[in-house]
Amino acid sequence: MRIDLISAVPDLLRSPLEHSIVGRARESGMLDIRIHDLRDWAVGKHRKVDDYPFGGGAGMVLKPEPVFQCLDDLDAEPDVHPADEVIFMTPDAPVLTQSMANRLSLNRRMIVLAGHYKGLDQRVRDSRITMEVSIGDYVLSGGELPALVLVDAVARLLPGVLGDAESALSDSFQDGLLDAPTWTRPAEYRGLRVPDVLLSGDHERIAAWRDGERLKKTRERRPDLLDRDDR
Ligand code: 6GU
């Protein structure tokens, strides 16, 4: 998969994408991430990418010209698959879910735009953005951290990125329930014991016990997940 990330603060994006699972996916060639500095497409002698909102109000708005021009230039790159989605990260959008990440992981190429200002000129949103994504009901100072969240959620689903041991299929949310609790050695520490069933070697009993724990935890912590139909 190829992902083009566009931001006016591209340094915020670099380091988190160089390590761990995403870093390894890039090194192995399964994931091709390109980071673009929106300022390279800034306009006028002051190299502006943002401006005051028409009609007044707080905060700045990303100007249309740099974003249109940047997207045009990305479109004009020869011999690359056209973007399947052009995604704008913004809090006034549907919230990212595991099923959304699953669907996005099937794409060949995505462009992700992170705004670091109050907003983005609506003309860009209307004519060039194909999908808008929030990562939750709270406000962050920019779309860069959300873009990293989206990339991580998608990258770990790409074939060959996770080993069997870390398999994405056993995650919380992959089937709509939270994960069961986990323990590792030693079996007793400071008088605290691991549940006997996990030491029993009876894999059927362990699986049934874990299912029960998952249901119990989901009921306690996220009852909203139990009556959702968007899995
Ligand atoms: Cl995508 N952007 C910003 N600025 N804040 C957020 C968000 C996105 N998702 C949740 N909060």
Image (cartoon, rainbow, N blue to C red):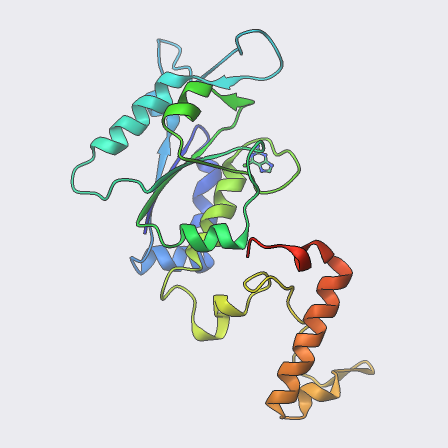
Where 76 falls versus 85 (above or below)? Answer: above
Where 209 falls versus 201 (above or below)? Answer: above
Which residue ends up furthest to the right in the rendered image?
Answer: 191
Which residue ends up furthest to the left in the rendered image?
Answer: 79
Whether residue 11 is visible here, answered yes or no, is yes
Residue 72, quarter of the rendered image = top left
Q: Is residue 43 left or right of 62 when viewed as pictured? A: left
Where 225 falls versus 195 (above or below)? Answer: above
Residue 193 position, x and y percent, is: 78, 83
Residue 153 position, x and y percent, is: 49, 53
Q: Is residue 91 left or right of 162 when viewed as pictured? A: right
Residue 217, quarter of the rendered image = bottom right
Whether residue 183 is visible here, answered yes or no, is no
Name the quarter showing ligand 1: top right
Q: Residue at x 52, y 34 (%)?
A: 143
Of 43 and 80, the residue lying toward us: 80
Q: Residue at x 59, y 8 (%)?
A: 56
Q: Residue at x 71, y 86 (%)?
A: 187
